[in-house]
Amino acid sequence: MTTLRQVAELAGVSIGTASVALNSGQVKESTRRRVIESANQLNYVPNQIGRALNTGKSNTIALLIMTSLEYVDIVQHTSLSYYHLQGVLSVVNEADYGLRVDVKAHEDPDLLDYFDRVVGNRILDGIIIVPLYLCDYSFLYILQRRGFPYVMMRPARFGKQVNYFDPEHYHGGQLVARLFGKRGYRRVAMINGPGTHVDAIEREHGFVAGLIEVGIQKLTKRYGDFTIQSGSAAMEEILKELRPDAVFCANDYMAAGAMKALARAGAKVPDDVAIVGYDNTDICDALVPSLTTVDYRVKEVGQCLARELLALIGGKVKSVKKSVQPFLVERESH
């Protein structure tokens, strides 16, 4: 592996001058060009730790997805995190930043130590946090106390002092309820995710508020874990209680499971039961009939999270309070 010393020797300068030149410091332009040409000739790759020590910046951020040991790991069982990652990568690549992806459980006993290391080791310039469940958020104080740049994908109700990006799942739930009211459905059911999952909570609250708005008073609810299997099991439980006109599933995978259970029961979608999902993932067009769903612009959300974090890092903004509204994608299942 080529070292900085070798680059400096080829360019005929000191190691210190070579380092300054490669890190956009104050040197003569002719010297900078000579150092860069030597680095290219030797295929020199700067050491990130050394760069961070020299400049105070690593040009690397982290995307942290926070799961729970109590539930199925939906990072592995659904494709949604991939769309977030796509959005984040598209921005960091354009900005010539590196991206580190971490998955940590809320219950991890070393979680606070993880945030201490993120802040203290100077290998990262900032972090995007995607917490999935209602748990202890004391780690935020570590970041805020040290002035470490972060953006969290959560609703504003976590406090005005939190840097957040809100995907407005409450509004998404309202959109489904209004669709059901417009279609004249009255026997309505919902298959939601875990009761402590933040997205699930927001989607249910919005859906219930929307049902009241359109005059639907009764709602049959069951809970799954965002997987196809849990959607199927929940639909079977609902059918023991009633044959609904319409079912809102809080993600597309549970909607796929619900459709399987209805097919086994001899019920046709949408003739007998309408189904609406959430997320607008790749599974929607593969289902027969194709799935009506809510698109919360997941790739765009990833892009916005990355842009806002880079703006914080660059000192262009002091805080982040942003949101984007989801929209309904109508297909054949309703």
Image (spheres, grey):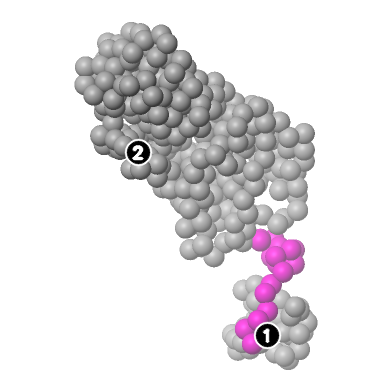
Taking the magenta stretch, the answer to whether it contains residue 229 is: no
* Residue 58, percent from left and from top: 66, 61
Q: Tell me the distance, in whole angstroms, between the alpha carbons under discs 1 and 2.
A: 53 Å
| Magenta stretch bounds | 39-58
Q: What number is the disc on residue 29? A: none
Residue 327 seen = no
* Residue 73, percent from left and from top: 60, 36
Q: Relative to 156, say whether 114 is above or below.
A: below
Question: What kind of residue is marked 2?
Answer: Leu
Q: Nearer the viewer, residue 172 or 80?
A: 80
Residue 295 seen = yes
First in sequence, mark 1 or 2: give its number: 1
Which residue: 62% across, 83% down? Answer: 40
Which residue: 43% across, 20% down? Answer: 235
Q: Are marks 1 and 2 in contact (CB under 8 Å)?
A: no
Residue 211, quarter of the rendered image: top left
Is residue 136 shown left or right of residue 227? right
Question: What kind of residue is marked 1?
Answer: Leu
Q: Residues within 10 Å of mark 1 (few under 14, many from 20)?
A: some
Q: Relative to 160, say whether 11 is above or below.
A: below
Which residue: 21% across, 21% down? Answer: 183
Q: Relative to 307, say whether 8 is above or below.
A: below
Total numbered badges shown on the rendered structure: 2
Is residue 319 shown left or right of residue 255? right
Q: Residues within 10 Å of mark 2 (few under 14, many from 20)?
A: some
Q: Nearer the viewer, residue 195 or 34?
A: 195
Secondary structure beneath dot 2 equals: loop
Taking the magenta stretch, the answer to whether it contains residue 43 is: yes
Q: Which residue in the structure is indicated by mark 2? A: 287
